[in-house]
Amino acid sequence: MKEYKETEEKTEKNAGEILSQKDLDVIEKNLGQMVELQMEELQTDEPEEFPEDHSADREDSAEEEDFTEEEEPAEGEESAMGEASAEEKSISDDGESSEEEEGMEESQKEELPDPNPKSGSEEKSSEEEPELTAAITSESASRQPSRRRRRAAGRRSRETAQRRKPEKARVPFSKRMAAGGRLLLRFFRSRWFRHIAVLLAVLFVVLFTAHTVRNWTYHSYEISEADNQTDTTSFNYCALGDYVLRYGLDSAMLTSRNGQTVWSVTYSMQSPALAVCGNTAAIYDKSGTTIVVCDETGQIGTVSTTLPIQKAEVAEQGVVAAILEDGDSTWIQYFDQQGEMIASFRTAMDATGYPMDLSLSSNGMLLGVSYLKMENGVPKTELNFYNFGNAGQIQMDNQVSSYTYENTLIPDVTFLDSNTCVAFLENGFAVFEGGQIPEKVNEVIVEQEIVSVFWDDSHIGMILDNDSEDYPFLLALYGPSGREIFQKELDFEYQNVEMGFGQILLTNRTGFCVYSTDGVEKFRGELSNVIVQDLFALGRTRFMLVAEDGLYTIRIK
């Protein structure tokens, strides 16, 4: 302010003096240099303009107004600041440096003192030129925008530029397709794609093979004579593991599938019957007192009872449970492999009931027995479970659980494994699970009459009466938990049904029919020139035929 006042006093002092032409040239030169310097600074700090974003312009204008209100110039600088603002506005709006220079020169000339004052003085001393030049320079510099405003303007321009990012150039569709094709080709050539392709191919082959095998059907068979010297009328046959067991009144023999004898034992029985669990068999004399226990290695034990045997069951390790007759009462006795009695308890019709059936678990730990009882002329069945391990030692007669069914019979009881027991009712079946104390987990009730039942270690099957002339039977198969697998109408007149090697085999005197566990009929055919006594599976496509005139091996194809 002090310099400004001194410059103003000098200007008033020299206002009455006449400036020479040389002084005017110096002033004009200095003014031109200052105008060029100011234009360069304003062009450098000038923000980029984006006509399409009007909201950003309004924000910038609002910021400039706020900034102007904060920085109000002093009274002596008001005119100079106003002129500088006018100059900045004209530069930003027009963008033409030539017009701005002309306007600046005219404004500067208007403010210069009159070159021809009335005082008449025409020359100026050369000693006063530096002082006058400094005064004009100071006055012009005061009109320039402050550094703070230039810095704020530059900051606003940068922020505006960041907000107004240019749109990305749109890539043509053909170029995008070409880039995608290159990426896809690179993936096809990669190691991961080869691994994935191999895995998918293997999975497809496995699924296709499984689907083909599951739905494959056979339409013919070939039969070969295995042994025509055997007296088939005096012996019974069954499959025992990978072998064939033949048993009769006085002996039993185990043969391989090609007819080679593995072992043979002798005994004396009036009415031999058989119980099988896995690869272990118990041949017992029904109404007699002898039980012979065998497996694939030969005879492993013998049990002799004091009472007639009604029915016997065996476990895989060779322990035996039997129902023994004793007049008006019956006994349930449990023997080890060497024939020693482990447990024995008496039953009576007026107390526990009459035992209809019994079954041992595969490990010999549990025993299930169904008892028929009569109350006021109404039958009911009681299913009792006995445990011969630690859990049953503290219970009376080793009994750990009991279930009663009113007005219902349970003619068959069987253990599928060491934990699952199935009790076949008159109108369905019930499933019990538990390795120590069996508990009922499911019950299936059917409306049709049950004609036959069959099972293996993982399936439960029933053949029901069907109200149809064309399909007199209904074949139903369930899982071990009682979940239904399929139901299929059946028109094959069968006499015997059993399961083996994951298939359902139905036979009659002249032919046989095979179903898979998915309900697919694998084969149906009539056998010529043979009378079927028995037929059991040796594999999925091989069967042993017991005929009146000998043994035959059948392979379906």
Image: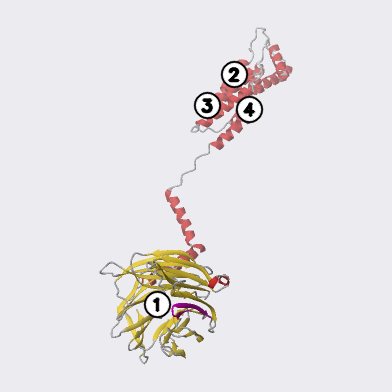
Q: Which residue is mark 3?
A: 94
Q: Which residue is mark 4?
A: 149
The quadrant in which residue 499 appears is: bottom left
Q: Which residue is mark 2?
A: 107
Where the C terminus falls, by quadrant? bottom left
Contact, mark 4 vs mark 3 (Cβ under 8 Å): no
Image coordinates of residue 552 in percent, x first then y, are: 36, 86
Residue 390 to residue 176: above or below: below
Query: At label 2, which amino acid type do we have?
Result: Ser
Query: Which of the colour schemes (rainbow, by chain, secondary structure, one colour) is used?
Result: secondary structure
Q: Is residue 488 left or right of residue 172?
A: left
Q: Is residue 403 left or right of residue 40?
A: left
Query: At label 4, which amino acid type do we have?
Result: Arg
Quick one: 451 or 66, which is closer to the camera? 451
Residue 45 to residue 337: above or below: above
The magenta segment is: 322-335
Determine the CA span between mark 4 and mark 3: 20 Å
Choose mark 1 or mark 3, whichever is in front.
1
Q: Which residue is mark 1?
A: 540
Determine the CA span between mark 1 and mark 2: 114 Å
Query: At label 3, which amino acid type do we have?
Result: Asp
Query: At label 1, which amino acid type do we have?
Result: Arg
Image coordinates of residue 245 in percent, x first then y, are: 43, 85
Choose mark 1 or mark 4, whichever is in front.
1
Determine the CA span between mark 3 and mark 2: 18 Å
